[in-house]
């Protein structure tokens, strides 16, 4: 199976290519395209990045991963659809435009690895019928919304008061306090800290090794690579159970915007602008 990657930035170099290599995908199957031709060096291997204009053919059932700035995703998706709409398409977060959701009746998937990480962790969490998920300095925007919904299911009511944010979900409530500082944060479920997961050696290598300071929050960005690995695997196998389509991704983006709009910091800023 061939992989076509559109974009060659940090996301591709630090996350996607290491994930593909950990899955045993050979470099000959990884085709990278971007605005300009160049070379990148990832995991002791050199990759040639070709100009996007040279992309003319994509085989059926190939996987296309779009990793470009959010405002360019729709343009790239249209181009991929024109080349071959039978490919399996993954689009990086955030999904910021409703128009991209309506491009085709076929489902395309959102690379929301925080959601898949939450699903992975849920296998070892002691979930009850109703749960309390508490974030201390460890929640960020649409990634946070996706992570909450992966554990507590779909949220139906979100609000913020005095800097404390609340998400009411089918399986419980998430409470978020403090601005994101992963290295100083913690995540709790039902008043117990969610500890760093047990990993095998291959997974340890994928997240860049272990340290004396590891916690779920401290290593959240690196642990999301495990979620990305599972996401790509589910797309390969056409397993939709743990995948997010464009509609859900866009909804999570809107929810995160709503949460930020009514935060204490945002309200203080609006008051300052009005009277000063």
Image (cartoon, helix red, strand yellow):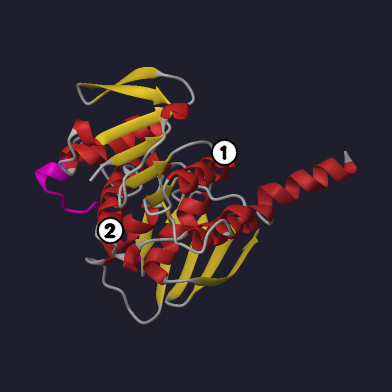
Residue 10's tag is none
- Which residue corresponds to the image point at 65% horizontal and 54% vertical from the top-left? 263
Image side of residue 111 versus residue 122, left or right:
right
Mark 1 is surrounded, within 10 Å at the Cα level, by few (under 14), some (14 to 19) or many (20 or more) other residues, namely few
Q: Residue furthest left?
A: 201
Whole-percent x, y for residue 160 in the image: 63, 61
Residue occupied by mark 2: 234
Q: Which residue occupies the foreground of this view, 252 or 55?
A: 55
| 7 horizontally vs 250: left or right | left
Q: Which residues are magenta?
A: 191-204
- Contact between labelled residues 2 and 1, with CB atoms less than 8 Å apart: no
Direction bottom: furthest residue: 129
Q: Is residue 25 left or right of residue 118?
A: left
Q: Is residue 102 left or right of residue 269?
A: left
| Residue 201 part of the magenta segment | yes
Q: Is 107 above or below relative to 85?
A: below
Asked if one can make out residue 207 in the rendered structure from this viewpoint, the answer is no
Disc marking residue 72: 1
- Residue at left offset 75%, top offset 44%: 269
Mark 2 closeness class: few <14, some 14–19, many ≥20 residues within 10 Å:
some
Q: Is residue 147 visible?
A: yes
Residue beneath the point at 32% across and 37% down: 15
Q: Quote the CA–CA distance across marks 1 and 2.
A: 25 Å
Q: Quadrant of the C terminus?
A: top right
Picture coordinates of residue 264 (x, y %)? 67, 52
Whether the magenta-drawn stretch holds residue 247 is answered as: no
Residue 72: percent from left, percent from top: 57, 38
Q: How many numbered circles does the render carry?
A: 2
Residue at 20 percent across and 31 percent down: it is 28
């Amino acid at each position: 199976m061939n992989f076509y990657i559109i974009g060659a930035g940090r996301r591709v170099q630090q996350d996607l290519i290491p994930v593909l290599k950990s899955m045993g995908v050979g470099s000959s199957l990884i085709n990278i395209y971007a605005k300009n031709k160049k070379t990148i060096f990832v995991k002791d291997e050199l990759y040639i990045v070709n100009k996007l204009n040279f992309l003319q053919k994509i085989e059926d059932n190939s996987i296309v991963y779009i990793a470009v700035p959010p405002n360019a995703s729709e343009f790239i998706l249209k181009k991929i659809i024109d080349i071959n709409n039978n490919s399996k398409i993954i689009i990086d977060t955030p999904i910021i435009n409703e128009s991209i959701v309506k491009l085709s009746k076929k489902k395309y998937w959102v690379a929301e690895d925080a959601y898949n990480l939450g699903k992975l962790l849920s296998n070892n969490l002691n979930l009850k019928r109703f749960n309390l998920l508490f974030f201390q300095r460890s929640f960020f925007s649409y990634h946070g919304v996706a992570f909450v919904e992966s554990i507590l299911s779909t949220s139906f009511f979100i609000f913020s008061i005095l800097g404390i944010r609340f998400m009411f979900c089918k399986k419980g409530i998430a409470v978020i306090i403090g601005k994101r500082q992963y290295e100083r944060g913690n995540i709790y479920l039902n008043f117990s800290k969610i500890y760093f997961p047990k990993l095998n050696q291959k997974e340890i290598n994928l997240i860049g090794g272990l340290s004396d300071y590891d916690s779920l929050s401290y290593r959240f960005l690196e642990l999301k690579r495990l979620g990305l690995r599972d996401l790509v695997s589910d797309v390969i196998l056409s397993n939709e159970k743990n995948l997010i389509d464009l509609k859900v991704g866009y909804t999570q983006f809107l929810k995160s915007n709503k949460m930020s709009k009514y935060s204490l910091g945002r309200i203080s800023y609006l008051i300052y602008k009005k009277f000063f």
